[in-house]
Image: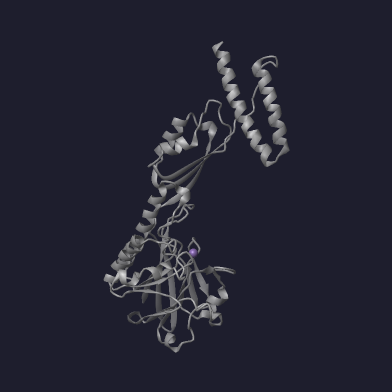
């Protein structure tokens, strides 16, 4: 039996511009997920590790970033586990490719790391009785998605494996199921989509691992890698794909009714009580906002720094129209409320984006005015 660890889309060095100060923390988790994948490969004693594109988020990856990644791959090399690395679309094999600027195979040492390129599109893993083929030379599209499949040398190996930085489907960055089926390969290690998937096309098993750590943290599932088992039973070949968690960051949407929020401090306390440093939390305040609730979303985010991997507070609550009997029309409050609510009604009936924005502003005017006048009347 041949066992492989398959990953892709690690996106080391991603900038995460939407995460502010948490960007560096997520980059560390991405590296930690690569380390966890290597630990798993060592613990499971796999024959080879396949990285099907986008190990790096960009071809501008720093030497330090490449050395860090190589130091993880070196642990595999030291255990005599082969690594086959395929450039993706973020770290594509252009003239300025990270794989030309740095010799990651040499950095990882021991000659155990191979990069699939148009110059070297086939890697023989003789001790595993396997061969790995990468994408075809784009100048020879007639050869199908995989390189030199017709070469007699390929068919000599028991296990024929393809790697492609694409996910099943039609269009750019995709491979048609018919092409997977026509490849005649036993297993195709795919990538690109950030959601894990696997299946069969004819006699070919394919898998997309998704990133080992979420790159855009927007799902409530942890990043995974694939453990792939290839086994011969009699004349038949069986390929099984199992996912294993190696990531730690996850995402949750939390909708809160603003009427249930007593104060900004109470909101901070409530969210701090549920702290999780691996969680990217999107809080959405909705419903009617009590007149007394003064809320600065940025201040709440600041107060929760460190409690979560990242918190975003969006205030979609709105001050309600006045309920119950209105004050007499000849009072300041009575005149004010009637005037402002009349304009809000007109704007909200108009139903376009500008009018909705103006109506939201007027609801805030209404809330502040009501508060001010209530206080003034109590004071007088
Ligand atoms: Mn990609």
**Picture quarter with the C terminus:** top right
Front residue of this view, candidates 214 and 22 = 22
**Snapshot quadrant of residue 107:** bottom left
Residue 137 appearing in the image: yes
The image position of residue 57, as x and y in percent, is 44, 61
Front residue of this view, candidates 67 and 213 = 67
Residue 325 appearing in the image: no
Q: Is 20 on the left or on the right of 113, as rendered? A: right
Look at the picture and state if 119 lies above or below 208: below
Q: Is 129 on the left or on the right of 162, as rendered? A: left
Which residue: 42% across, 50% down?
23
Front residue of this view, candidates 19 and 320 = 19
Look at the picture and state if 10 lies above or below 124: above
Look at the picture and state if 106 lies above or below 233: above
* Count of marks, rendered view: 0
Q: Residue furthest left?
A: 78
**Picture quarter with the N terminus:** bottom left
The image position of residue 362, as x and y in percent, is 64, 30
The image position of residue 358, as x and y in percent, is 65, 34
Look at the picture and state if 151 lies above or below 211: below
**Snapshot quadrant of residue 316:** top right
The image position of residue 22, as x and y in percent, is 41, 47
Which residue: 56% across, 82% down?
142
């Amino acid at each position: 039996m041949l066992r492989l660890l398959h990953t892709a889309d690690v996106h080391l060095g991603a900038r995460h511009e939407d995460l502010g100060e948490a960007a560096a923390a997520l980059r560390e988790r991405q590296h930690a997920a690569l380390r966890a994948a290597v630990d798993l490969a060592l613990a499971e004693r796999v024959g080879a590790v396949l990285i099907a594109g986008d190990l790096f988020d960009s071809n501008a990856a720093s030497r330090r970033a490449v050395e860090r990644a190589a130091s993880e791959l070196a642990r595999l090399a030291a255990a005599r586990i082969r690594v086959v690395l395929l450039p993706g679309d973020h770290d594509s094999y252009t003239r300025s490719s990270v794989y030309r600027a740095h010799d990651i195979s040499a950095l990882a040492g021991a000659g155990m790391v191979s990069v699939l390129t148009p110059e070297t599109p086939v890697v023989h893993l003789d001790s595993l009785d396997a061969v790995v083929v990468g994408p075809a030379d784009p100048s020879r599209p007639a050869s199908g998605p995989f390189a030199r499949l017709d070469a007699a040398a390929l068919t000599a190996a028991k296990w024929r494996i393809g790697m492609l930085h694409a996910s099943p489907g039609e269009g750019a960055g995709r491979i048609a199921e018919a092409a997977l089926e026509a490849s005649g390969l036993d297993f195709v290690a795919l990538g690109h989509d950030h959601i894990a998937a696997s299946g069969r096309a004819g006699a070919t098993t394919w898998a997309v691992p998704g990133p080992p750590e979420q790159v855009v943290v927007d799902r409530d599932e942890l990043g995974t890698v694939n453990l792939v088992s290839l086994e011969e039973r009699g004349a038949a070949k069986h390929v099984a794909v199992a996912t294993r968690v190696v990531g730690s960051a996850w995402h949750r949407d939390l909708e809160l009714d603003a009427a249930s929020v007593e104060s900004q401090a109470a909101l901070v306390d409530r969210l701090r009580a549920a702290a999780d440093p691996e969680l990217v939390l999107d809080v959405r305040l909705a419903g009617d906002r009590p007149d007394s609730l003064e809320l600065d979303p940025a201040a709440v985010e600041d107060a929760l720094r460190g409690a979560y991997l990242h918190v975003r507070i969006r205030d979609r609550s709105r001050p309600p129209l006045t309920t119950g009997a209105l004050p007499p029309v000849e009072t300041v409050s009575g005149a004010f409320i009637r005037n402002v609510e009349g304009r809000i009604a007109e704007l909200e009936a108009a139903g376009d984006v500008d009018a909705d924005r103006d109506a939201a502003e007027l609801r805030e005017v209404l809330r502040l005015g009501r508060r001010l006048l209530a206080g003034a009347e109590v004071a007088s």
